[in-house]
Image (tube, helix red, strand yellow):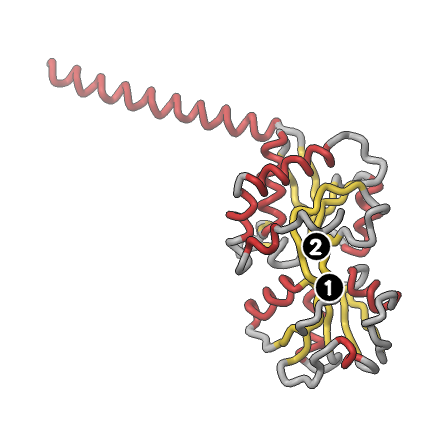
Amino acid sequence: MKGKRVIAGILLVGILAVTLTGCKNTDSSKKETEKPVITLGSDNYPPYNYLNEDGVPTGIDVELATEAFKRMGYQVDVVQINWEKKKELVESGEIDCIMGCFSMEGRLDDYRWAGPYIASRQVVAVNASSDIYKLSDLEGKNLAVQSTTKPEGIFLDRTDERIPKLENLISLGHRELIYTFLAKGYVDAVAAHEESIVQYMKDYDASFRILEEPLMLTGIGVAFAKDDDRGICEQMEQTLEEMRQDGTSLKIVEKYLDDPQKYLEVDDLGY
């Protein structure tokens, strides 16, 4: 009888432990779902934001945003948006912020910014066999860009004396299409963030060559509506900087990019 009582006691302790653990997990989940939600808008732009094999948003910006907003007391909902309508969406309140490898250069007066939190190069890429090696070699050539991106503005405005006159500038709605156009020979070159080009080459075993001369060095930031006075933007900037200083950002970036430290050298960007 004594042995049976001991066994029964052990079983009771186990049941209580499981029950208490379950309650603890439930309470934790409940607290998490009770947090206010920040809706973050982005498009498909690996390695910053893309859907994994399970259809779940992932990438550098997704991980950085999730950690930052968690520290701030929010949960984040990453939604895919039409990149051409990003300003309209954030100003209408349909999304709270834009975070998708978004260059601050030339847009400082258009949004309220948190950042820069990453430094990025805008570059030109050509097919490996191309005879284009310098920006000046693009004279009279055809080049593809994603619409409403910085490279589009650079080649349209041509305020930089290094930028030659093209035969055609083709602006496409989706990132992937510019690389398809280049691979098939529809254009002579493409222009985009260096990280995006490198990622595409990895994903599709493409043989592109990135020109050594960059279009620009730019800071990447999180954009809020210009009239957003909730203080979330300022809190986000402080939190992202804390993450950069405590090594969290480095741990995230190194999952996706080689030589991750260079992307976190944002102090001299001048913003």
Instruction: Decide which of tag 2 and tag 1 comes sooner along the chain.
Output: 2
Direction from residue 165 to residue 242 in the image, left or right: left
Question: Does the rendering let one see residue 179?
Answer: no
Q: Secondary structure at mark 1?
A: loop
Give the image location of residue 172, x and y in percent.
78, 67
Q: Are marks 2 and 1 in contact (CB under 8 Å)?
A: yes
Q: Name above or below for residue 243 compared with residue 56.
A: above
Q: Which residue is more in the foreground, 221 or 93?
A: 221
Q: Name above or below for residue 262 compared with residue 9.
A: below
Direction from residue 248 to residue 22 in the image, left or right: left
Residue of label 2? 43
Q: Name above or below for residue 192 compared with residue 21.
A: below
Q: Amino acid type of disc 2?
A: Asp
Q: Amino acid type of disc 1?
A: His
Identify which residue is drawn at 56% across, 45% down. Answer: 249
Residue of label 1? 174
Identify which residue is drawn at 17% across, 17% down. Answer: 6
